[in-house]
Image (cartoon, coloured by chain):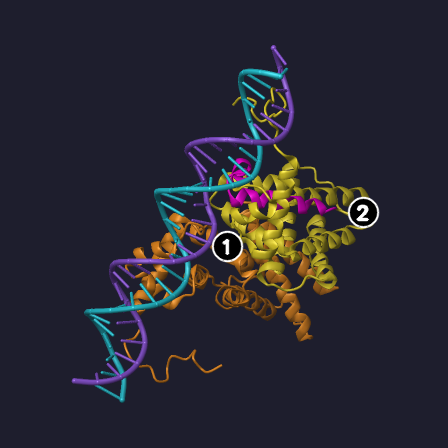
Chain colours: A yellow, B orange, C cyan, D purple
Amino acid sequence: MLSRSHPKPLRTGRPRSAAADEAILEATRASLVDLGWSKLTMGDVATRAGVAKTTLYRRWAGKNELVVDAVAVLFDELEMPDLGSLSADVQAVVLQFAALLERPETRTALMAVVAESTRDEALRTRIRDSIVDRQKRLVLQGRQRAQERGELPVEEDEEAASATADLIFDVIAGAVVHRALVSAEPIDADWARRFTALLLAGLEAAASS
Amino acid sequence: MLSRSHPKPLRTGRPRSAAADEAILEATRASLVDLGWSKLTMGDVATRAGVAKTTLYRRWAGKNELVVDAVAVLFDELEMPDLGSLSADVQAVVLQFAALLERPETRTALMAVVAESTRDEALRTRIRDSIVDRQKRLVLQGRQRAQERGELPVEEDEEAASATADLIFDVIAGAVVHRALVSAEPIDADWARRFTALLLAGLEAAASS
DNA sequence: GCAGTTACGCTACGGGGCGTAGCGTAAGGA
DNA sequence: TCCTTACGCTACGCCCCGTAGCGTAACTGC
């Protein structure tokens, strides 16, 4: 494995257009909104972006990878606020995540690429790195703050702590996604409040046991 | 809306082959296993089932509807056992659901059709009727038994009770699906135990408040 | 400047799936 | 037996995929 990943050393020839990159990703999101995942085509994206179809294939292997990258940046909007209590923080994140899932781009793309990833290890890694880990970071951040406030105990066993964080992450993200996309019911402040109450009550009980 | 749904009245001519129906659904599941959702084609399913492609289109509008029906029957396997305690019952259902998601047919198909349903109201209804409601029934059944055992209080407000059941359903199904397909981590007895402990502790705390 | 290297736009193409039309045949019901 | 509907089969136009080939554009090192 030569260090081919670093584009630094010995770059010669015409550089890739950064403007084209952004235009393509923007066009991809627009096409997702207008056409949805299944009817989105590489040709349509190329036309919208004002580039040749071959230019897309020089950067992305196919529709899957392209859409993951196009949607990933939207997850940068997610932030863990510091509202003074774990309950308020969790509710805020839940509502943020729900708002993201309200957007037609993410709605149609997220489940589709996850479905594809069940048969594509490389795609799963790409999703994990560019989307899932960004969400997971929020859980770790929230726990950190809660521990500083004394709302959550500091777990000694690092392995157990990691497993707990994974569990909480699956519960939060899973419940929100399921509510939004499967049950197709609105996620309002009231739902966020009731969900958070359920989750935190479970955590407290588990901590005191 | 004439009562076209009931095939009873005035059925004349050659009846549809029930054997063909089953052969097609079985072929669809086999094709899902071999090819996955994205590479599954109507032509391939027809060939496997030993029927003409036109026969498929006489029964299903397209790939989405066909796959939903093919996978839906697998969800009939889900059953709420009566193991004597709510905790044991929930753990058992979680493991059952996880086992279902281990199967390549459901793995590749479930998220894909849900993704499609975000832009197809009719498909969403179909999924709800043939898949989601079958799972939801288990939650209601489990609550019923837990109330009979005295493990859960009987909620007076019917609307609040329904909202709680919906919440629990989204938490359980969402967490299991997220763990299995997004985090792509194994769901073993230990995870089921820890998840159930978290959920039930939250429920008890909410009930006593 | 000039040569070398890489990116880009464009065209064209084979391959394959989609969904339907049309036809002759098969299987039930009145 | 007639009527009606389902079935198998063939053929088709349509669209998308992913790539090859070519001339041009942009940037680097000499």
Disc 2 is placed on an element classified as loop
Q: Amino acid at mark 1?
A: Ala
Task: From the viewer's side, name the closer residue of B121 and B92.
Answer: B121
Circle 1 Cα neighbour tier, 10 Å, few/some/many (<14 / 14–19 / ≥20) = many
Chain at numbered mark 1:
B
**Vertical position of residue A50 compared to residue B157: above or below:** above
Chain at numbered mark 2:
A
Task: From the viewer's side, name the closer residue of D18 and B97.
Answer: D18
The magenta span reads A54-79
Whether residue B185 is visible: no
- At x 64%, y 63%, the residue is B167
| Label 1 and label 2 in one chain | no
Circle 2 Cα neighbour tier, 10 Å, few/some/many (<14 / 14–19 / ≥20) = some
Dominant SS in magenta: helix
Q: Amino acid at mark 2?
A: Asp
x, y percentage for residue A124?
Answer: 53, 42
Disc 2 designates what residue? A82
